[in-house]
Image (spheres, helix red, strand yellow):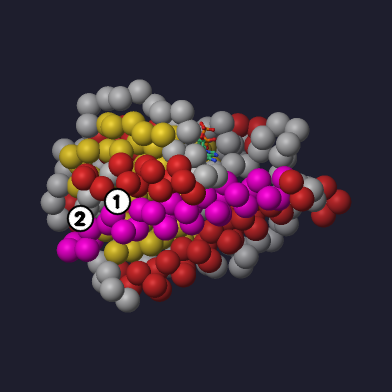
């Protein structure tokens, strides 16, 4: 069971990318938590409704779609937690992680930046104003350890790494700006570990079974990290075990 006691009372949460492996597990775990009143679950194709789960449509490629989703939540505000769990690593012939600079393609790079970095920025634009000003509130986006410049020793995966690095920079900017008038609002990136989902499926060979988390396990890890966050943590990226990942 998740324990989101650090939020100090009943919580309303929004998850973007609710049709994904980790996003879906986050929705389920939040809905099962007695401290959570409602979960607003956004995806391109809305997920089925469930107890405490209100599905909604959102395409993070489209500013108007993100704006409409946020507008629809105005009556549900303030929210305590917004988690962006959308992301893209591969998409058939259109996008595969590049092993060499020789494989760089403008359209594939643009697609990766659109989904992994621009989309979460648009969500921040429209959803940060919905967060609770009076107590702890968290805007979190799923990043990836491979987006760390300091941690990059293997190279490759140019578009995905660079797009997640750009996401991390956006998170740092958001944290600095938001801290000026919302002292209890935190903006963080989260690395879920390697999680058994559509995104990681082609790249799971060589991952030790104990290091391949189920989406449900990953969701539990991530919500524990979120619960432990304090204002000094804003602007940073944290792994599933609570360790900070270098920029
Ligand atoms: N799995 C891992 O091992 C791993 C490791 C590190 C980081 N991450 C990060 O964790 C996050 C979740 O990944 P996952 O493993 O759960 O992958 P997943 O199962 O493939 O889910 C990805 C989600 O992103 C959504 N999405 C893609 N493009 C979108 C768009 N334009 N608008 C709205 N939603 C969009 C997908 O929606 P549709 O269903 O409509 O396509 C889906 O809900 C990603 O940011 C990923 O980079 C995952």
Asked if residue 182 is positioned above or below residue 72 in the image, the reply reads below
Instruction: Pinpoint residue 195: horizontal percent, then vertical percent.
Output: 50, 38
Pick the front one: 208 or 151: 151
In this view of the protein, which residue sits in the foreground, 138 or 42? Answer: 42
Q: Which residue is mark 2?
A: 7
Q: Reply above or below: 197 against 4.
A: above
Residue sitting at x 20%, y 41%: 36
The reply, left or right, for residue 3 in relation to residue 202 is left
Task: Determine crowd level at label 2: few under 14, some 14-19, many 20+ residues with C-alpha closer than 10 A.
Answer: some
- Compare marks 1 and 2 and give the one earlier in the sequence: 2
Q: Which residue is mark 1?
A: 81
- The residue drawn where x is 50% and y is 64% is 170
Q: Is residue 140 visible?
A: no
User: Can you give x and y, in whole percent of width and height, for residue 117 in the image?
Assistant: 56, 54
Please tell me in which quadrant of the rendered image residue 154 appears: bottom right
Residue 22's place in the image compared with 136, above or below, is above
């Amino acid at each position: 069971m998740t324990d989101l006691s650090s939020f100090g009372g009943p919580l309303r949460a929004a998850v973007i990318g609710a049709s994904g492996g980790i996003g879906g597990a986050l929705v389920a775990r939040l809905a099962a938590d007695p401290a959570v009143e409602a979960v607003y679950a956004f995806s391109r194709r809305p997920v089925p409704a469930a107890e405490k789960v209100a599905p909604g449509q959102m395409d993070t490629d489209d500013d108007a779609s993100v704006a409409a989703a946020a507008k629809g939540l105005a009556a549900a505000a303030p929210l305590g937690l917004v988690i962006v769990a959308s992301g893209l690593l591969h998409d058939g012939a259109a996008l595969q992680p590049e092993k060499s600079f020789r494989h760089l393609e403008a359209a594939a790079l643009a697609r990766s930046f659109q989904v992994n970095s621009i989309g979460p920025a648009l969500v921040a634009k429209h959803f940060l104003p919905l967060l609770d000003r009076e107590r702890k509130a968290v805007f979190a986006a799923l990043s990836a350890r491979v987006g760390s410049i300091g941690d990059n020793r293997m190279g490759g995966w140019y578009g995905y790494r660079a797009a997640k690095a750009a996401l991390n920079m956006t998170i740092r900017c958001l944290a600095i700006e938001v801290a000026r008038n919302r002292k209890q609002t935190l903006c963080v990136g989260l690395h879920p570990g390697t999680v058994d989902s559509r995104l990681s499926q082609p790249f799971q060979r060589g991952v030790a079974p104990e290091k391949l988390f189920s989406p449900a396990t990953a969701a539990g890890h991530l919500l524990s990290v979120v619960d432990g966050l304090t204002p000094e943590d804003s602007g940073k990226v944290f792994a599933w075990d609570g360790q900070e990942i270098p920029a």
